[in-house]
Image (tube, grey):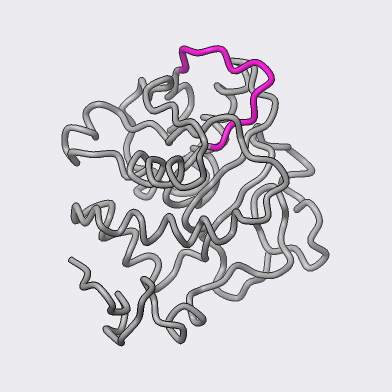
Amino acid sequence: MFYPDECILCGASSTQDFCQPCHDHLPQLPLNHCPTCLWPVPTGELCGACLTKPPAFTRTVAAERYTFPIDALIHSLKYQSNLATAPVLANLLIEKLKHIHRKPDVIIPMPLHPIRLRERGYNQAMELSRYLARHMKIPLSPTSCSRIRHTPPQTELPWRDRQKNIRKAFSCAIDLSGQHIAVVDDVMTTGATLNEFAKILRQQGASEISNWVIARTLPETGSA
């Protein structure tokens, strides 16, 4: 539970979710990064991985880097049923989306398999998407796509096994011809899940796919 007029991190008096000092010290992404996957690149150009094997998605926008205290807030939303955290995190992402050139036609939350949904009771990506769609006035498509394979959590697997784990895990039932889709998720680590989902959206005709994530996992040193 969060108290009104208090910073959620330090408890100082604040009319916003974070007091100014706490907000200023949130873990930022490197200034120069790959525009597709956000991996640190000194020149700000496409990274080697995206040049060698371009992903199915067009770009990625993340609010912060995945480290403390952002990781703790996401964990609270995802595993402790603290749904009040969803708008707090979504607002951080909205700050980064103020200067996008063109709004997506529709927001689609990263689907959760029915078994995982029953275990957790909610889809954290859906909670984030509802808030983003309402505040940015973008249509939300909550049930058009689904997760059809129940796979082990990506976090439990080595990076090299994650792409294989998520293969053919998604299905989408609507025509997305020519549309710009925003896919909302909490964390991007290797990008394997987002890329596999983007492949399905491409098959349905999507012309542009933007990943909107709360946090991106990056090396602590900020180097590739």
Indicate the position of residue 151 as horizontal and vertical percent values: 33, 32
Vertical relation: 196 (above or below) 155 = above
Query: Is 179 contained in the magenta span?
Result: yes
Q: Is residue 123 left or right of residue 47?
A: left
Closer to the camera in the image, 113 or 8: 8
Q: Is residue 221 left or right of residue 107?
A: right
Indicate the position of residue 165 as horizontal and vertical percent values: 43, 33
Total number of numbered discs in the rendering: 0
Vertical relation: 136 (above or below) 163 = below
Q: Is residue 43 left or right of residue 8?
A: right
Q: Main secondary structure of the magenta part?
A: loop
* Rendered residue at 40%/73% (across/down): 68
- Viewport quadrant of the C terminus: bottom right
- Viewport quadrant of the N terminus: bottom left
Quarter-of-image position of residue 109: top left
Query: Is 181 contained in the magenta span?
Result: yes
Indicate the position of residue 217 as horizontal and vertical percent values: 51, 60
* Rendered residue at 48%/75% (across/down): 26
Indicate the position of residue 46 as horizontal and vertical percent values: 78, 51
Vertical relation: 192 (above or below) 8 = above
Q: Which residues are magenta?
A: 172-182
Closer to the camera in the image, 3 or 82: 3
* Rendered residue at 23%/33% (across/down): 117
Quarter-of-image position of residue 178: top right
Closer to the camera in the image, 82 or 65: 82
* Rendered residue at 65%/15% (across/down): 177
